[in-house]
């Protein structure tokens, strides 16, 4: 009996990730054949670094989408936390690890505020996070006057630049972070509550699940990962950048949401996984890198990513209709 359950679970996982895995493998093979520079060691390292940041953000936004919400303030939170880390460390002389911790917690605070406002007012998450997006970006500009702040701390700068066993240190940070978030979603009562809220909010409330708690926790996880991403980006760039994560072609919110949806997270809520979002982040990273190596204009890259998001959401809606149809047929 146990063997049957485990085998059916394995088959289910294979089916769940078959689509994103197939797309990823196909993209890599195409770029391997069509370009001479894509599969170089230097490009693979650069690609992995870019994937790490988007994977962290997509894991966070997966938690938010699972409960049926969205977060447009991701890029602004990354920018503000990158600035906070450098200001505290280089500007005020704080210990590097205390500055890093405070910056990450600042991101968590932003997330908690987003989740708290959502729970208290039940305003559309789109409106809430659009407002906080503007406010947080403004804070980043106030801290810096609109200009980057250079980091002079060698230890801090090493976080995003050094390697261990041939892989960037940020890769290990990403793996540990994704495992933690994945375990929260798959193995804890809180994770089950998040899926329940996203699947049917009213039924979850009648079951005694606190929507306020679930909302605050989901957005706080998002904020913490955005704060961590801000620290990594500041270290990589050796500066706190108030403009990162929101410019043309580099919108962190767009890339993170795209990665989550491409990885199988249902935009309607109630379904998704960290591993699926990681695969989505890999696809987005390979696509970005590939189009650059193919010398595709950056504006056309934006068009391509927009179409990809639309197709992913449309595919998700089709899957949802098919599931509903099967349930009705079974009934």
Image (tube, rainbow, N blue to C red):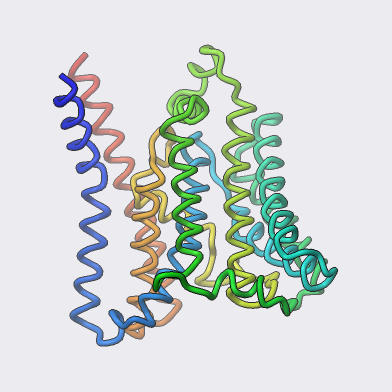
**Where residue 274 sits in the image (x, y, percent)?**
41, 46
| Quarter of the image where the C terminus is located | top left
- Residue shown at the point (50%, 66%) measured from the top left: 169
**Residue 172 locus on image (x, y percent):** 46, 60
Q: Residue at x 64, y 48 (%)?
A: 129
Q: Quadrant of residue 233?
A: bottom right
Q: Nearer the viewer, residue 203 or 91?
A: 91
Quadrant occupied by the N terminus: top left
In the image, is residue 155 above or below residue 135? below
Q: Quadrant of residue 195?
A: top left
Q: Nearer the viewer, residue 189 or 319?
A: 189
Q: Is residue 331 above or below residue 75?
A: above
Q: Nearer the viewer, residue 102 or 215?
A: 102
Give the vertical position of 100 relative to 260 (above or below).
below
Q: How many marks?
A: 0
Left or right position of 282 against 91: left
Task: State left or right for residue 149 relative to residue 176.
Answer: right
User: Residue 272, percent across and down?
Assistant: 39, 40
Front one among 238 and 30: 238
**In the image, residue 230 lies at what x, y percent?**
62, 62
Residue at left offset 68%, top offset 76%: 239
Q: Is residue 172 left or right of residue 158?
A: left
- Please indicate whether residue 309 sits to the left or right of residue 34 in the image: right
Residue farthest along the front direction in this orientation? 165
């Amino acid at each position: 009996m146990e063997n049957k359950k485990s085998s059916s679970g394995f088959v289910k996982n294979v089916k769940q990730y078959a689509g994103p895995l197939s797309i990823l493998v196909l993209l890599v093979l195409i770029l391997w054949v069509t370009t001479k520079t894509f599969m170089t060691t230097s490009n693979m390292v650069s690609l992995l670094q870019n994937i790490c940041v988007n994977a962290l953000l997509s894991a966070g936004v997966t938690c938010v989408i699972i409960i049926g919400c969205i977060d447009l303030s991701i890029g602004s939170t990354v920018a503000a936390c990158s600035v906070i880390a450098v200001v505290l460390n280089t500007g005020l002389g704080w210990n590097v690890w205390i500055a890093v911790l405070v910056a990450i917690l600042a991101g968590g605070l932003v997330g908690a505020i987003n989740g708290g406002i959502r729970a208290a007012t039940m305003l559309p998450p789109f409106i809430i996070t659009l407002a906080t997006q503007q406010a947080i970006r403004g804070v980043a500009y106030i801290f810096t006057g609109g200009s980057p702040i250079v980091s002079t701390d060698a230890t801090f700068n090493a976080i995003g630049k050094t390697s261990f066993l041939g892989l960037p240190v940020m890769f290990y940070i990403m793996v540990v972070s994704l495992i933690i978030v994945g375990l929260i979603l798959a193995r804890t009562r809180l994770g089950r509550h998040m899926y329940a809220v996203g699947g049917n909010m009213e039924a979850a409330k009648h079951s005694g699940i606190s929507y306020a708690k679930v909302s605050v926790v989901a957005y706080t996880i998002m904020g913490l990962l955005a704060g961590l991403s801000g620290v990594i980006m500041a270290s990589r760039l050796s500066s706190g950048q108030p403009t990162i994560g929101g410019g043309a072609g580099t919108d962190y919110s767009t890339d993170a949401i795209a990665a989550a949806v491409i990885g199988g997270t249902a935009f309607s809520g109630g379904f998704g996984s960290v591993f699926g979002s990681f695969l989505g982040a890999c696809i987005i990273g390979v696509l970005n890198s590939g189009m650059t190596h193919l010398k595709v204009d950056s504006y056309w890259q934006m068009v391509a990513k927009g179409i990809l998001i639309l197709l992913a959401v449309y595919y998700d809606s089709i899957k949802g209709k098919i599931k509903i149809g099967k349930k009705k047929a079974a009934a």
